[in-house]
Image (cartoon, rainbow, N blue to C red):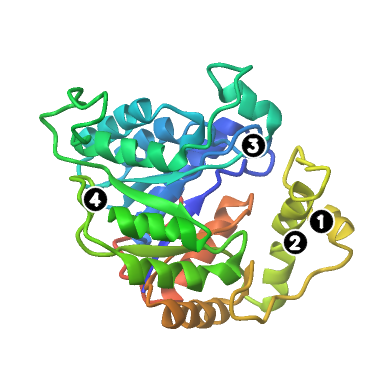
Amino acid sequence: MRLSILDPLVLPKGGTSGDALRTAVRMAQAAERLGFTRYWIVEHHDVAFEANPAPEVFAAALAGATSQIRIGVGGVLLNHYSPYKVAEAMRTLNALFPGRIDVGIGRATAGPVADRALRRLREVEPPDDHAAQVEELIGWLGNDLPANSPFHGVRIMPDQPPGPLPWILAVSEESAERAASLGLGLACSAFHKPEQAPHAAAAYARGFTPSRYAAGISAPQAFIAVRVIIGETQEEAERLAMPVRAVFKLRRSPERIMVPHLPELGEAVAVMGEIIPAETGNWPAYIVGTPEQVKTILLRMADATGIDEFMIQDFLDDPDLRLRNYELLAAALSLERRGCCRLSD
């Protein structure tokens, strides 16, 4: 089994956004030494305790500080942007770090005010044309837009090979089927509706067609993204999971409450009402437990889907604790280390 990391760039306790970025550089270096496959960074806007508004910029720093681990802009919220401009940024990263860049393609709301701020034309509601945007972006990444495209003659760094490797971020079967039909990688999210993940994985495997685009792939590639909170005991893991549980309960409430900082344990318990025990179902929203318990759940998910790579995300604001947990999970799953794993200065 392969492991990867999806980093939300949570500010370290008592730290700044700059501290979060510098911590992520050191964490990516440590993850590389631990044998992780990818280190992806998310794109979020107007989240006070996260430092991730421009992953396409920060990816260059991560790739420049590492040498083997794949770095992912995971993902580009394409509904906010011109596919051409996104492709220019991604092609630049690919030229600098050939064969090491992933681009995850998704769409999401950042909230009504932030969404409006991201638009070039603030008074115009954008169309729902995501499928067309995705195909245009893939065409730019390989410089092979179809002949009927109005941009067919435009090229981005035509002397460079196609890429970077594009992935479709998918929660539903519909998105997984889009990835399959275009011959792209599947980044299957088990965050929002984890029970949908096995259906999305099955739809992708069933419908995959080798890509007609130069930037696509000829054989299916997929991973499942999961939220994982590890402790040396189950009780510790359940306590560590409380802040992220509280954050998403508030964020998904009718009031859409965005907290100014990651809650302390007492604040989280006040929101949730109690310390929530680890879920026992086949597809929990939060995988919470000891390394061996987490390993058992991941192996069960792998067996159910045929997918052998998992991208893990936590929401811990203690970098040393995060690294300890990555070390514990890497050891449980026998990842091949590439060196010492402490967070270097």
Residue drawn at x 65%, y 28% as measured from the top left: 114
The residue where tag 4 is placed is 216
Say which label, 2 or 3, has the lower sequence index. 3
Q: Nearer the viewer, mark 2 or mark 3?
A: 2
Residue 242: assigned label: 2
In this view, the residue farthest toward the left is 159
| Mark 1–mark 3 distance (CA, rounded to whole Å) | 20 Å
Residue 75, percent from left and from top: 45, 44
In which quadrant of the rendered view does residue 316 lie? bottom right
Q: Nearer the viewer, mark 1 or mark 3?
A: 1
**Is 267 placed above or below 115 here?**
below
Say which label, 3 or 4, has the lower sequence index. 3
Q: Is residue 126 left or right of residue 5?
A: right
Q: Nearer the viewer, residue 221 or 50?
A: 221
Circle 2/circle 3 CB separation < 8 Å:
no
For the C terminus, the image quarter is top left
The residue where tag 3 is placed is 15
Circle 1/circle 2 CB separation < 8 Å:
yes
Say which label, 4 or 2, has the lower sequence index. 4
Say which label, 1 or 2, has the lower sequence index. 2
Residue drawn at x 59%, y 80% as measured from the top left: 282
Q: Nearer the viewer, residue 217 or 337?
A: 217
User: Which residue type does callout 2 highlight?
Assistant: Met
Circle 4/circle 2 CB separation < 8 Å:
no
Secondary structure beneath dot 1 equals helix
In which quadrant of the rendered view does residue 95 lie? top left
Q: Nearer the viewer, mark 4 or mark 2?
A: 4
Residue drawn at x 18%, y 32% as measured from the top left: 147
The residue where tag 1 is placed is 268
Say which label, 1 or 3, has the lower sequence index. 3
Circle 1/circle 3 CB separation < 8 Å:
no
